[in-house]
Image (spheres, rainbow, N blue to C red):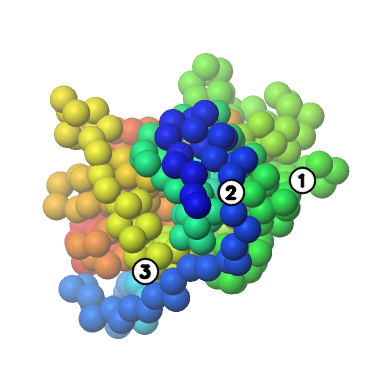
């Protein structure tokens, strides 16, 4: 039998009757037709470099890396700025960042796998759970699997999808990237995150299954490809994940939430995925279906200027060889 899961306490109650079944998930495959933009354009890489540079300048980013992928047609990565303002160590395409709430789809992927295996069932929308309830989901995962969450991520998601740059910090690890923060505008200037907390891991541990993962821009784009192409869990679970409900029913401009996925629209484009932000860190993880392009990014600071173009808009202009917005 399976246990229905409703609201936060229902998820926790479901643990008691969870069944032991082996790991599973669909091995969906896909082919991508030639995109509407020219993937062979010799000037494309330079335009994507410019898009990243302009986005970083717009938002006063200290250091960031971005990846743009259309499977079979394009794979580009770039980086700007520095990891450390004192040492001036460059931010590279392999530099990791704290991805904050972009962790939620990773956690949801494990929950969906357990549902596919018959070890719990869902009767409500996962995506509408607040931060504490995603932490509760992490606890549920540990009880059902009998393994620590970092190991579950590795075995079920990170290892199979070859996301070698992604991990969940555990107690005793060295200081992870603390970044630079003005606490989302509360301070007049950005300060090192280490000035606020002894270790960046204290932020990661408090966010845990709701926002604790560390990753690279390439891993974020690759993960979203795996998720939306059905490589992480069943087709039915993927359909459930994209059963959209308006975030603010009276204002469609605020977008729609599914099960740990967000969908919004800007002009002619749709964005599907999940971004994240914590003091000293932010991430982008989006798919633009009109262009069949995936965008991943990590940065070592917070406070983005919402009035400026987002990274997806600048990438779109670069792909179509149009003036930057």
Q: Residues within 10 Å of mark 3 (few under 14, many from 20)?
A: some
Q: Which mark is residue 182?
A: none
User: Which SS class for mark 2?
Assistant: loop
Q: x, y percentage for residue 49? A: 41, 62
Q: x, y percentage for residue 72? A: 36, 81
Pick the front one: 158 or 319: 158
Q: Report the side of 124 relative to 277 (left or right).
A: left
Q: x, y percentage for residue 26? A: 44, 71
| Residue found 58% across the figure and 48% down from its top | 18
Residue highlighted by disc 1: 170
Q: Residue at the front extreme? A: 1
Residue highlighted by disc 2: 18
Distance between the Cα atoms at labels 3 and 1? 30 Å
Q: Residue at the right extreme? A: 172
| Residue found 66% across the figure and 61% down from its top | 154
Mark yes or no: residue 238 visible.
yes
Q: Is residue 251 above or below residue 102?
A: above
| Rendered image quadrant of residue 226 | bottom left
Q: Report the side of 36 relative to 86 (left or right).
A: left
Residue highlighted by disc 3: 229
Q: x, y percentage for residue 108? A: 48, 49
Q: Report the side of 317 relative to 159 (left or right).
A: left
Q: Nearer the viewer, mark 3 or mark 2?
A: 2
Q: Return the disc, 1 or 2, that comes first in the chain's sequence.
A: 2
Q: Return the disc, 3 or 1, that comes first in the chain's sequence.
A: 1
User: Which SS class for mark 3?
Assistant: loop
User: Do the CB atoms of the residues marked 3 and 1 lie less than 8 Å apart?
Assistant: no
Q: Residues within 10 Å of mark 1 (few under 14, many from 20)?
A: some
User: Do the CB atoms of the residues marked 1 and 2 lie less than 8 Å apart?
Assistant: no
Q: Nearer the viewer, mark 1 or mark 2?
A: 2
Distance between the Cα atoms at labels 1 and 2? 26 Å
User: Which SS class for mark 1?
Assistant: loop
């Amino acid at each position: 039998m399976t246990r229905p899961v409703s609201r936060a306490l229902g998820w926790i109650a479901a643990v008691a009757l969870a069944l032991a079944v082996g790991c599973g998930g669909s091995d969906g495959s896909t082919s991508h037709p030639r995109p509407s933009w020219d993937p062979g354009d010799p000037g494309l890489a330079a335009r994507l470099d410019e898009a990243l540079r302009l986005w970083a300048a717009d938002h006063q980013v200290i250091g960031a890396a971005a990846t743009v992928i259309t499977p079979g047609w394009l794979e580009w990565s770039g980086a700007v700025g520095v990891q450390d303002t004192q040492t001036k160590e460059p931010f590279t395409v392999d530099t990791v960042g704290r991805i904050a709430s972009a962790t939620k789809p990773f956690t949801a992927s494990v929950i969906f796998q357990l549902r596919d295996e018959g070890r719990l069932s869902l009767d409500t929308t996962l995506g509408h759970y607040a931060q504490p309830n995603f932490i509760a989901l992490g606890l549920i995962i540990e009880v059902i699997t009998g393994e620590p969450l970092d190991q579950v991520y590795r075995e079920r998601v990170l290892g199979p999808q070859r996301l070698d740059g992604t991990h969940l910090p555990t107690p005793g690890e060295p200081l992870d990237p603390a970044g630079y923060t003005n606490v989302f505008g509360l301070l007049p200037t950005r300060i090192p995150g280490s000035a606020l907390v002894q270790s960046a891991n204290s932020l990661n541990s408090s966010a845990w299954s709701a926002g604790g993962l560390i990753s690279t821009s390439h891993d974020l784009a690759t993960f979203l490809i795996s998720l939306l192409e059905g490589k992480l869990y069943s087709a039915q679970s993927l359909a459930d994940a994209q059963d959209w409900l308006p975030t603010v029913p009276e204002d469609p401009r605020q977008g729609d939430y599914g099960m740990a996925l967000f969908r919004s629209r800007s002009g002619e484009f749709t964005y599907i995925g999940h971004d994240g932000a914590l003091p000293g860190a932010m991430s982008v993880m989006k798919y633009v279906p009109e262009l069949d392009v995936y965008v991943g990014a990590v940065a070592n600071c917070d406070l983005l200027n919402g009035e400026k173009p987002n990274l997806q808009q600048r990438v779109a202009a670069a792909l179509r060889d149009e003036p930057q917005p």
